[in-house]
Image: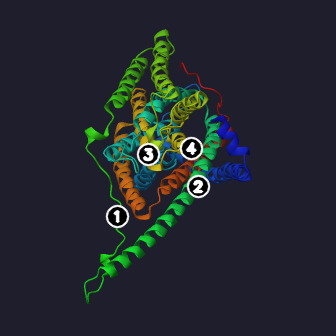
Amino acid sequence: MAGVGSKWWYGTSSSRLRGKILIGFIVAISTLTMAVAEPSLKLKDSFYNGTQKVEPHHGTTSQSGYKHLWPDMKFGWKTVVGTIITFLGAACGSVGGVGGGGIFVPMLTLIVGFDSKSSAAISKCMITGAAASTVLYNIRLRHPTLELPIIDYDLALLFQPMLILGISIGVTLNVLFSDWMITILLIIIFGATSAKAFFKGVETWKKETKSKQEAASVQLDNSDNEIEAAEENAPPGGTTSQYQIKSGSKKEKVRKVSITENVYWKELGILVAVWLIILALQIGKNYSTTCSVEYWLLNTMQIPVAVGVTSYVAVSLYKGRRKIASKGEARNNWPLHRLLFYCVTALMAGTVGGMLGLGGGFILGPLFLEMGIPPQVSSATAAFAMMFSASISVVEFYLLKRFPVPYALYFFVVATISAVVGQHVAGKLIRILGRASLIIFTLAFIIFASAILLGGVGIGRSIKQIERNEYMGFENICS
């Protein structure tokens, strides 16, 4: 993969242009985040002057004086605006396979009035709802071109264990790291991934245009031949109807089969087993004394579970016993360095997702596309992996009492419904237009918008901390 990366940056003049545009993306994100940060500072002023008067349900204070701020749940303009943004964010996020956490966290912080850490926790609930409904919608669908499920279970089995391990690490680092550290990391990662996704979308759009032109040319030739044949075989004195000489092209239909036939039960069983084991370890950890021997033992026991399953799949791919069939090619003997890169990337996606309250799809989605996975399969598989990883975070955040249950349930339901609507509308548009690249452009847009919104909120919060001379170093993880 390193070779692929270097070629992307330095290989051709087109690649060098991409590098320059990528730098432009990051500069644009930095500029726009400052624009978002300025009004967010005003909102934060009113938030601290007004909302802080509302007594939170839990007011735990850390070394830096940090408090959980949970506004009372009541119907008002904030709830209405938050519901609309949640609906649009979950609908678009489910299409791109990113969950929508980059939209949810700023909305919960700036509009509804939650603190950043509680917003990240509620966002995980919303991502879980959106991902679960997306999986239920896709579970009977087939691969767009091959006789396979639209969810690639082998691909999920390679990435999901490390993604869950990364989420667990990220939740811990969420307590440890300051906002300014996370903001810098966010802008760099999101700038790069949104640019990569955008370029992949342009590339896919060009291929689709070429395929449509070739198909139209073939269809025209077939129509001319059928017209000639119809005129030769027409009855005496009869006329040939245009409806009788159509080329025979049929409207593409959604291919569905039964769940029992479309699910790879062995792979699903392994994924559920990993989820249950790590969930049990997380529950045990949260009932142990922080930083005790038992606490760290339960934490480290997650590593052999996740690494063991991922290593088994990676070795099978390396030796050719397994293959990523959704790529449309029977490739055997995957390079070892590429498999290692994929595993590390999944771990990084989970870690950053756990720190920011996101699902990890913002990294997995572009990575799947770079691997050559079709956009529909990439989106469905990323959502499938996120369903497991985000739900782990929800349980952990609940045990840590990081979110109010009524608010979380409300936004969970809204995100669940809107994700189904987004999948249905996007599916119809793709079938009508024949443009699966719409999924990639949606992915790039959501990541770019998330970078601006999350970056703006992070910069605004950091500026306020500087003005108030607040502590901005590492938190005590054992406090």
Q: CA distance from mark 3 to mark 1?
A: 21 Å
- Residue to which mark 4 is pinned: 370
> Which colour assignment does the render follow?
rainbow
Hey, what amino acid is under mark 4?
Glu
Q: Secondary structure at mark 1?
A: loop
- Residue to which mark 3 is pinned: 377
Q: Secondary structure at mark 3?
A: helix
Hey, what amino acid is under mark 3?
Val
How crowded pointer 2 is (Cα within 10 Å; few <14, some 14-19, many 20+) is rated as few
Hey, what amino acid is under mark 2?
Glu
Q: CA distance from mark 4 to mark 1?
A: 29 Å
Which mark identifies residue 251? 1
Q: Secondary structure at mark 4?
A: helix
| Circles 4 and 2 in contact, beta carbons < 8 Å | no
| Circles 2 and 1 in contact, beta carbons < 8 Å | no
Q: Nearer the viewer, residue 277 or 338?
A: 338
Q: Nearer the viewer, residue 77 or 122?
A: 122
Q: Nearer the viewer, residue 7 or 22?
A: 7
Q: Secondary structure at mark 2?
A: helix
How crowded pointer 1 is (Cα within 10 Å; few <14, some 14-19, many 20+) is rated as few
- Residue to which mark 2 is pinned: 203
For marks 4 and 2, the one nearer the N-term is 2
